[in-house]
Image (tube, rainbow, N blue to C red):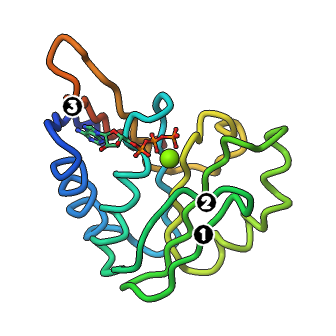
Amino acid sequence: MIMEKKLESASPDETESIAIELAKEAKAGSIYTLSGDLGVGKTVFARGFARGLGIMSPVTSPTFTLVNEYRKGRLPLYHFDVYRLGEAEELYDTGFEDYLENGGVVLIEWAERIEELLPRPYFYISIEKDLSRGEDFRLITLKEMQ
Ligand SMILES: Nc1ncnc2c1ncn2[C@@H]1O[C@H](COP(=O)(O)OP(=O)(O)OP(=O)(O)O)[C@@H](O)[C@H]1O
Ligand SMILES: [Mg+2]
């Protein structure tokens, strides 16, 4: 069965809590993608996800390196932000395929930029604002891409 869930968040803390719960079920080798506009909350979600894996170090967007590695949790976490990738194929230069084989969890911000290169299945997560419901409201959609 294909899973699709829509969740509502009213604050950064609530977005982190949603991510924490999701991370508790994460398995080695899984890919999670994060899509949504600039400043919508992808890194907030990634921080919660890290906490859910038991990673307590600060989580910020990877910038020049494109990927941050966290090895102190239940599973290793490889946090990508591919916003600055020139072309989708440059993903392979980051060692993406090696990370996948390393038994960790891969989480990718701005994954819509490399969508055609993603091996399935993966978990798609989108975060959207709805200003009619307030500045801090976010609609979070979780979908299993088979
Ligand atoms: N419900 C919410 N969930 C997540 N973040 C929220 C929420 N309400 C307000 N915010 C604020 O929105 C901002 C989200 O910033 P964040 O860096 O996570 O965005 P991003 O999607 O990673 O941006 P970028 O595309 O630049 O990587 C933070 O300042 C956060 O406090
Ligand atoms: Mg970010």
Q: Position of residue 85 (x, y in %)?
A: 77, 44
Q: Secondary structure at mark 1?
A: strand
Q: CA distance from mark 2 to mark 1?
A: 6 Å
Instruction: Please indicate, yes or no, whether residue 108 appears anywhere in the rendered image.
Output: yes
At 85% from the left edge and 49% from the top edge, which residue is drawn? 90
Q: Give the quarter of the image for residue 46.
A: bottom left
Q: Mark 3 is on which residue type?
A: Asp
Residue hosting label 3: 136
Mark 3 C-beta to ligand 1 under 8 Å: yes
Q: What amino acid type should be assigned to the residue bearing mark 2?
A: Pro
Q: Identify which residue is drawn at 54% across, 56% down.
A: 61
**Residue bearing mark 2:** 62
Q: State the separation of the CA atoms marked 1 and 3.
A: 27 Å
**Badges 2 and 3: C-beta atoms under 8 Å apart?**
no
Q: Secondary structure at mark 3?
A: loop
Label at residue 34: none
Tally of marks: 3
Callout 3 crowding tier (Cα within 10 Å): few <14, some 14–19, many ≥20: some
Q: Is residue 89 above or below residue 50?
A: above
| Sequence-wise first label, 1 or 3 | 1
46 to the left or right of 63:
left
- Nearest to N terminus: mark 2 or mark 3: 2
> Which residue bears the numbered disc 1?
68
Amino acid, disc 1: Asn
Image depth: mark 1 or mark 3 in front: 3
Q: Would you call the spot at circle 2 few (<14 residues within 10 Å), some (14-19), or many (20 or more)?
A: some
Return the residue nearer the eye: 45 or 142. 45
Task: Say if mark 2 contacts mark 1, CB within 8 Å.
Answer: yes
Residue 23 left/right relative to 99:
left
